[in-house]
Amino acid sequence: MSLTDTHSSLKKILKDNIRSVKDFPKKGIVYKDITPLLNDRYLLELTSRMLAEPFRGHHIDYVAGLESRGFLFGTNLAQDLHAGFIPIRKPKKLPAETVSVEYKLEYGTDILEVHTDSINPGDNVLIHDDLVATGGSSMAATKLIEKLGGNIVGYSFVMEIEILNGRENLDQTIPFHSILSV
């Protein structure tokens, strides 16, 4: 079996363990549930390694994880890349001074915030979330990091929902990595 075949087999194992939940959080949405990947110690480690793989050797100061599922693998990713972790949160969840940005979801609008002292100008930041759908939350995170003077060095996702074209809505000059396409 070749390395490519092995990589494809590992991706299939991960994909087979993502649960689809119809009509959550609202009717018409199919929620992609990653908790089975978190529940199994081997799948957790495999997912973490596959997320870090394309960014090893890059100078990354911080991994910015988007609330809330971006926190789950984002802290592992930061640790694996020897970087700090920045939580990007929903409104009024962070205790110190914040900057915020409003963005569109596939089913409404929302707001994200980050502490104003999270990064210094020129810091290299990898944006991570569990999935990219329309790209709205990742675009909002990009705006927040750039407001603070940070450089976006990559986007990292466990999966992308291809039909929603979120990848195309992100800056095409920035490296994009998603383990799975669903």
Image (tube, rainbow, N blue to C red):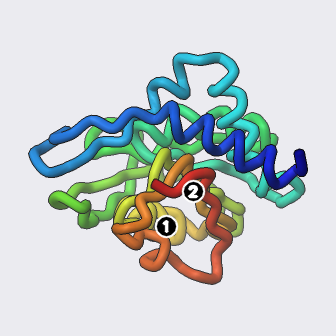
Specify the quadrant of the image occupied by residue 173.
Answer: bottom right
Q: Which residue is mark 2?
A: 127
User: Relative to 72, does residue 144 appear above or below in the rendering?
Assistant: below
Instruction: State left or right for residue 20 relative to residue 73.
Output: left
User: Relative to 104, does residue 168 appear above or below in the rendering?
Assistant: below
User: Relative to 51, does residue 174 appear above or below in the rendering?
Assistant: below
Residue type beneath disc 1? Thr
At horizontal 59% and vertical 17% (from top left) the residue drawn is 40
Residue type beneath disc 2? Ile
Q: Position of residue 95 (x, y in %)?
A: 37, 35
Specify the quadrant of the image occupied by residue 82.
Answer: top right
Q: Is residue 83 visible?
A: yes
Are the residues flagged by discs 2 and 1 in contact, CB closer than 8 Å? yes
Q: Which residue is mark 1?
A: 142
At horizontal 17% and vertical 58% (from top left) the residue drawn is 107
Determine whether the residue tagged by mark 2 lies in a helix, strand or loop. strand
Mark sitting earlier along the chain (2/1)? 2
Give the farthest residue toward the front: 1
Q: Position of residue 25 (x, y in %)?
A: 18, 40
Q: Position of residue 180 (x, y in %)?
A: 57, 52
Seen from the viewer's position, the closer of residues 108 and 92 is: 108
Determine whether the residue tagged by mark 1 lies in a helix, strand or loop. helix
